[in-house]
Amino acid sequence: MDRKKSEEFYTKLKSQLLDTSLWPSKYLYKFIVPSNGTQIKEIEQIFDNTGAVINTKQSSKGTYTSVSIIVNMKNPDAVIAKYKEVSKVEGVISL
């Protein structure tokens, strides 16, 4: 995603989060990662010490793993900051 589209996405997401939730609030992150890499560990490190509940499930062929993370976030900016951190991990698809 180019920088301009990325910023537009995060601006729209922040607006939606402000409209739909009272903060602080639990937030569900969902990512898809290749099963054979280090991405799951990298994502776990990003959410380390946040009280996050992390669940993983491999695809039927075992090629990909879905990572679901439920964590209490203080505001939409904190949610977006985590998305930006995870976006630096190679091969991760945010849902």
Image (cartoon, grey):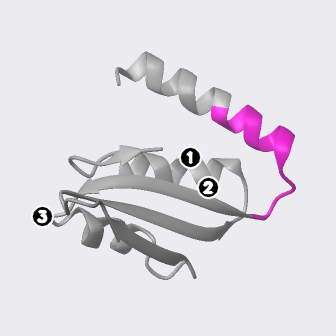
Q: In this view of the protein, which residue sits in the foreground, 66 or 45?
A: 66
**Circle 3 residues within 10 Å: few <14, some 14–19, many ≥20:** few
SS of the residue under disc 1: helix
Circle 2/circle 1 CB separation < 8 Å: yes
Residue 89 place in picture, x, y as percent: 26, 52
Amino acid type shown at disc 2: Ala
Q: What residue do we see at 29% from left, 47% from top?
A: 88
Dominant secondary structure, magenta:
helix
SS of the residue under disc 2: helix
Q: Earlier in the sequence, mark 3 or mark 1?
A: 3
Residue 2 in magenta stretch: no
Residue 83 place in picture, x, y as percent: 47, 49
Q: Which residue is mark 3?
A: 36
Magenta stretch, residue numbers = 13-25
Residue 16 place in picture, x, y as percent: 75, 35
Q: Which residue is mark 2?
A: 78
Q: Which residue is mark 1?
A: 80
